Amino acid sequence: MFTSYEHHLDILQDKLCPVHHIDFYKLKACVYNWHQNIEVIRICKDCILQSGDREYALHPGDMAVVNANALHRLYAEDLPHFYTLIIDESFCKENGIHTDKLHFTPVFRDAECFSLHEQVTETFLQYQKTEDALDGAKLRIALLRLLVHLQEFHTEPTENALQDNAPAEEYVKTVIEYLSSNYAQNICLDDLAGICGISKYHLIREFKRYTGQSVLTFLNTVRCKNAEAFLKQGQSVTEVAEQCGFESIAYFSRTYKKYMGISPSQVKS
């Protein structure tokens, strides 16, 4: 089974908009993926949600929540249609909702929740048009209403969470979480392998199998995505290079251009 990790670091580009809205009319090949941010889905056409080793038949009007770090995929015989919101974990925590410690009901039917999801979609699209700070505030309010409703009415005891992940999945996730939180530090493979209690060669092999990337490629992607966010906030190239763990400005510029396609100095604040 090939899986794809989605880091969603582009959510960091705009602090006023801690959510992505995606309208799916079609899907790529049915590939499992997982991510730290929860995903809240509004179903408009029959499809199947596979989460771990469980499958759920979804119908128009259903809601689905993909919990933090849950391996999952959505697919259908025909092209499915659904609206999904990917919500920034840090925004949730800042407002007292710890999505990494909650287990949301995977599938349910709730007209009010469906309506709240639609309201987030509408305010998101409005903000995308205007980029106005007031519309951004309306979006965050609508998003909080949805999150509060989910926590109040659609959470389960944490022991209901799936516990079927293979050991390799768990230590790959551990490494990804570590890299995502400590990207500014000097990191070596031996240290990462020690965190997991395995050899670095085993880590290299399994990390590539689960993410499709080498550890170094993943780390540089995380560093460059965070660097992009800082550059767009108006910080200097020198400041960002140091904040994101690059040993020199030259190495930062070279790496950033390789992964992002432009030089750091070309990023507009």
Image (cartoon, grey):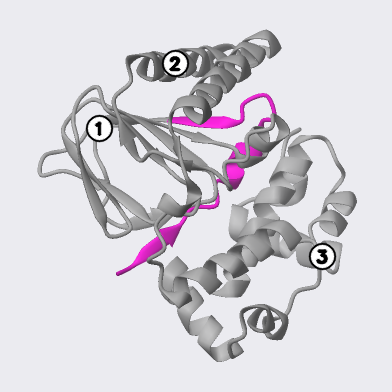
Q: Amino acid at mark 3?
A: Ala
Taking the magenta stretch, the answer to whether it contains residue 9 is yes
Label 2, residues with CA under 10 Å away: few <14, some 14-19, many ≥20: some
Q: Amino acid at mark 2?
A: Leu
First-in-chain label (1 vs 2): 1
First-in-chain label (3 vs 2): 2
Is 260 positioned to the left or the right of 48 in the image?
A: right
Label 1, residues with CA under 10 Å away: few <14, some 14-19, many ≥20: few
* Secondary structure type for disc 1: loop
- Residue 210: give x, y in percent of width and height: 43, 70
> How far is mark 1 from mark 2, CA to CA?
21 Å
Label 3, residues with CA under 10 Å away: few <14, some 14-19, many ≥20: few
**Residue 121 in view of the camera:** yes
Residue 128 image-quadrant placement: top right
Which residue corresponds to mark 1?
25
> How far is mark 3 from mark 2, CA to CA?
48 Å
Question: Quick one: which residue is furthest to the left in this view?
Answer: 77
Residue 30 image-quadrant placement: bottom left
Which residue corresponds to mark 2?
116
Residue at (30% x, 50% y) in the render? 73
* Secondary structure type for disc 2: helix
Q: Magenta segment, which residues?
A: 1-21
As displayed, is residue 29 above or below residue 214? above
Residue at (18% x, 30% y) in the render? 59
As displayed, is residue 103 above or below residue 52? above
Is 183 positioned to the left or the right of 145 in the image?
A: right
As displayed, is residue 85 above or below residue 191? above
